Image (spheres, grey):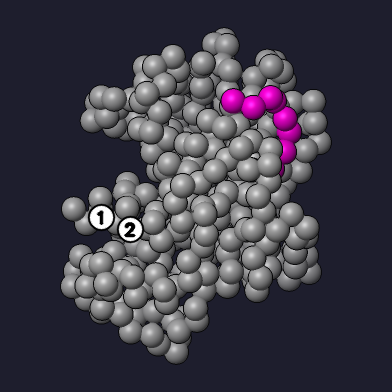
Amino acid sequence: MRLALLGATSQIAKDFVRNIEQETNWTLGLFSRRPNAVEQWLKRSPLAPPSFVGDFAEFARTKQPYDVILNFVGSGNPARTERVGATIMDVTHDFDELALQYLRRNPDCRYIFFSSGAVYGGGYKSPVDDQTASLIPINQLGAQDWYGISKIYAEARHRALSDLSIVDLRVFNYFSYSADIEARFLVTDVLRAIRDRQVLQTSHENIVRDYVGPHEISQLIQRVLSAPPTNVAIDCYTKSPVDKLSMLKRMQSEFDLKFELVERQTGLLATGAKWNYYSTSKKAEKLFGYAPKDDSMDVILKQSRLILR
């Protein structure tokens, strides 16, 4: 099977490549803005499948018969999302259109697009499910809305192309051993405090998150590719989410984390406040047989041990 990865420098893309080393009959086309960085990374990852490395212009004119396109292009972390601002809409559209142009020329090719839980909008006072409607404050749009809107527009385009095989994977929270520990996520804030032997200050609100890791993403992609072609969006999830206070206490027990709850906002809210940022939808299981082995706390602990090692 021939796979084209757009955004090959992204964390999720590189984790996926590492996790499919056993797929000896797969070959990869790794496309990015910085192909030299991809080539250097491959030299440090000798177990990766055979790969062609190129830039996006090379993908636009390629004649290679790819079976699957995986679009990993995204902002990566809250700080970058905040810096990119409204231009994320153009970035998302342009690279989505790059993939769709290939599909129009090669309609038998499958397309997996990495979307986001941000498509639902709102403050996530409750977790979302298959009946949840997207909430867009159309008369009060702000910087926190651009990212979600860019993904909504892409998903809408995909559903309109119902004759093509397109699966949108909505990732709510992703965490792996390759994470940039300087990124401003809750878990990386925790890990920096452990590494630097500092006291983590975090707001007292007990938010809930569901963190998928490399194994969940790899299993889901492989399940999608093993199933008949379809056109659908699905939410990503583990066996169960974790609330912040439970996570902090477990990290305290496992890694001697020291933390303090404060009466102020401590994190970046690049895409808005989210109280229960996860989904209870099990459409991935119903359609593709996806069965995560770990819960969110398992993912955090396994990946944190690798980072702190």
What is the number of the mark on residue 305? 1
What is the number of the mark on residue 301? 2
Q: Which amino acid does the dot numbered 1 rest on?
A: Arg
Q: Residue at x 65, y 50 (%)?
A: 282
Q: Residue at x 42, y 77 (%)?
A: 245
Q: Residue at x 69, y 25 (%)?
A: 229
Chain part drawn in magenta: 226-233
Q: In the figure, residue 24 lies in which quadrant?
A: top left
Rendered location of residue 176, percent (x, y)? 37, 49
Rendered location of residue 133, percent (x, y)? 78, 60
Rendered location of residue 220, percent (x, y)? 54, 38
Q: Which amino acid does the dot numbered 2 rest on?
A: Leu
Point out the residue furthest to the bottom here.
263
Q: Can I make out residue 182 in this image?
A: yes
Relative to 2, is 287 above or below?
A: below
Rendered location of residue 19, percent (x, y)? 38, 33
Are circles 2 and 1 on residues that touch, CB within 8 Å?
yes
Front-lying residue, 72 or 208:
208
Q: Residue at x 65, y 74 (%)?
A: 125
Q: Is residue 20 left or right of residue 146?
A: left
Q: Is residue 101 left or right of residue 24?
A: right
Relative to 180, is 191 above or below?
A: below
